[in-house]
Amino acid sequence: MKDILTLGIESSCDETSVAVIKNGREILSNIIDTQIPIHEKYGGVVPEIASRNHIEAISRVTKLALKEANVEFKDIDAITPTYGPGLVGALLVGVSYAKALSFAINKPLVGVNHIQGHIAANYLTYKELKPPFLCLLVSGGNTQIVYVRDYTEFEVLGKTRDDAIGEAFDKIARVVGLDYPGGPKVDKLAKTGIPNIKLPKTHFENSLDFSFSGIKTAVININHNTKDINKADLCASFEKTVTEVLIENIRKAIEQTGMKSLAIAGGVSANSYIRSEILKLQNDDLKVYMPDLKLCTDNAAMIGSAGYYNFINGKRDELDLNAVPNLKL
């Protein structure tokens, strides 16, 4: 059987990334051009600057990805760009480039949902992982418990009703005076603190949904109103409390579905405390999967993997494919 090579293209936020993936499971190349140093001085991603930098980087990054994989355009079977969700201007760069490429080299265009890409990061780390399984998706834009029925079939069992967990981490980071990107810096500071501050948890009856606006507001108020507050203790308490909320809902989802496999995905799945606590759920009845750290944050390898499964399941897009900033799974 002929190997299938997908060219993954990711530009949904502040990472310009292109990857060559073989059969959805093997990374031949995964080039990531990060804009973190550019946005650091602004304390967050500036959409217009992100888009301009994607335009400057995308051709160069594509050439590097092909070179590292030791392939040419003629060897590629499908062009698979992220088309949402994300920043619309940033998405348009990747989608437009992919459409032009598809037309120029006469290869199929297969759009990929960025959330589906995060889930697929697990396929690159664990060759044996196959649906069905549960996936906890935790990122800057999403917090969801997803029932992965098949490679291209998903059911969202629970989602955030307000802030995504990554948004909450970034806001807490700014409040306590940490630089962008906030999530990793909260994680680092929390390691030096004691989780001794009681914070609120939001639960919904008969629902697996989340809410992080209450705990975010509580942390902001405590920080503003408590003289000489220990920032490390505050970060540790926040991290511990949100992790407890995640695990409580995961336990309920496992109970409801009877699933024997749990994966985590998304940028926040790189958080060391969340990873360690979720790993504790593993037992004889439950196997826990976690992507390599480099595959948790935005990258084109995960997009190329998801694109492969879309491609072999018959998905094709026309050249009128557009960016969908609020795309749902």
Image (cartoon, rainbow, N blue to C red):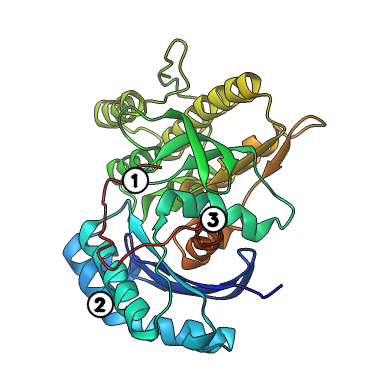
Between disc 2 and disc 1, the foreground one is 2
Instruction: Name the N-terminal-most of marks 3 and 1.
Output: 1
Label 1 neighbourhood size at 10 Å, few (<14), some (14-19), many (20+)?
many
Residue 16, placed above or below residue 173: below
Please state if 189 lies on the left or on the right of 259 as rendered.
left
Q: Nearer the viewer, residue 17 or 327?
A: 327
Q: Nearer the viewer, residue 241 or 146?
A: 146
What residue is disc 3 on?
313
Dot 1: element: helix
Q: Is residue 41 visible?
A: no
Using the numbered discs, state the Cα–Cα distance from disc 3 to disc 2 in whole angstroms. Answer: 31 Å
Task: Evaluate if marks 3 and 2 touch, with contact meaning CB atoms under 8 Å apart.
Answer: no
Which amino acid is tagged 1? Asp
Which residue is located at x 51 percent, y 65 percent? 304
For the C terminus, the quadrant is: top left
Which residue is located at x 48 percent, y 55 percent? 117
Using the numbered discs, state the Cα–Cα distance from disc 2 to disc 1 in whole angstroms. Answer: 26 Å
What residue is disc 2 on?
55
Residue 279, placed above or below residue 42: above
Which amino acid is tagged 3? Asn
